[in-house]
Image (tube, rainbow, N blue to C red):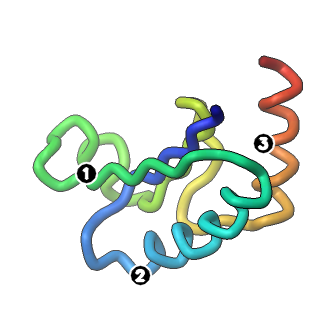
Amino acid sequence: MTVVTVYSRHGCHLCENAIETLTPLSKELDFQIDVIYIEGNQELLNLYSDQIPVIHIDGKHHDFYKVDPVRFKSSLEKHRQHQ
C-alpha cells in the first residue's frame, strides 16, 4: 500500500488543513496517511522547520505548505506507474 507521510507540528493549521484534504483522498485512492511530528527530532527540524507540512509519497518528496488535490492525484498516479 502506498504511504503518504505528512511531516507536521502540533498546532499547525496548515498541517491540519493538509491532513483534512488528504483524508477523503486516502479512502478514494487507497493510500495510508502517516503523520510525523517533527518536534523533538533535531534532524527533522533542520530539514523541515520552515516548510511544514511537508508531504512525501512513499518517501519521495511531493510538496509542502498545502495539498492541491488535482496535483496530488496526478503525482500519486505517476508514482504508482513507476513502481
Q: Residues within 10 Å of mark 2 (few under 14, many from 20)?
A: few
Q: Residue at x 25, y 70 (%)?
A: 10
User: What's the residue at 72%, 48% (across, down)?
Assistant: 30
How far, Cα to Cα, is label 2 from label 1? 15 Å
Q: Earlier in the sequence, mark 3 or mark 1?
A: 1
In the figure, 12 relative to 25: above or below? Answer: below
CA separation in Å, label 2 and label 3:
24 Å
Left or right: residue 54 versus residue 10 is: right
Instruction: Residue 58: name its quadrant.
Output: top right
**Helix, strand or loop at mark 2:** helix
Q: Secondary structure at mark 1?
A: loop
Residue 38's mark?
1
| Numbered label attached to residue 81 | none
Give the amino acid type for the residue marked by disc 2 in the picture.
His
Of circles 2 and 3, the one toward us is 3
Q: Residue at x 15, y 41 (%)?
A: 42
**Left or right side of 63 for 41:** left
- Please tell me the numbered disc located at residue 13: 2
Q: Amino acid at mark 3?
A: Leu
Image height check: is 32 above or below 82? below
- Amino acid at the residue labelled 1: Ile
State left or right for residue 30 relative to residue 51: right
Count of marks placed on residues: 3
Question: To which residue does mark 3 refer?
Answer: 76
Q: Earlier in the sequence, mark 2 or mark 3?
A: 2
Residue 47 in the image, given as x and y percentages of width and height: 34, 41
Q: Quadrant of the C terminus?
A: top right
Residue 23 location, x and y as percent? 60, 66
**Residue 70 spot, x, y in % from top left:** 85, 63
**Earlier sequence position, callout 2 versus callout 1:** 2
Q: Residues within 10 Å of mark 3 (few under 14, many from 20)?
A: some
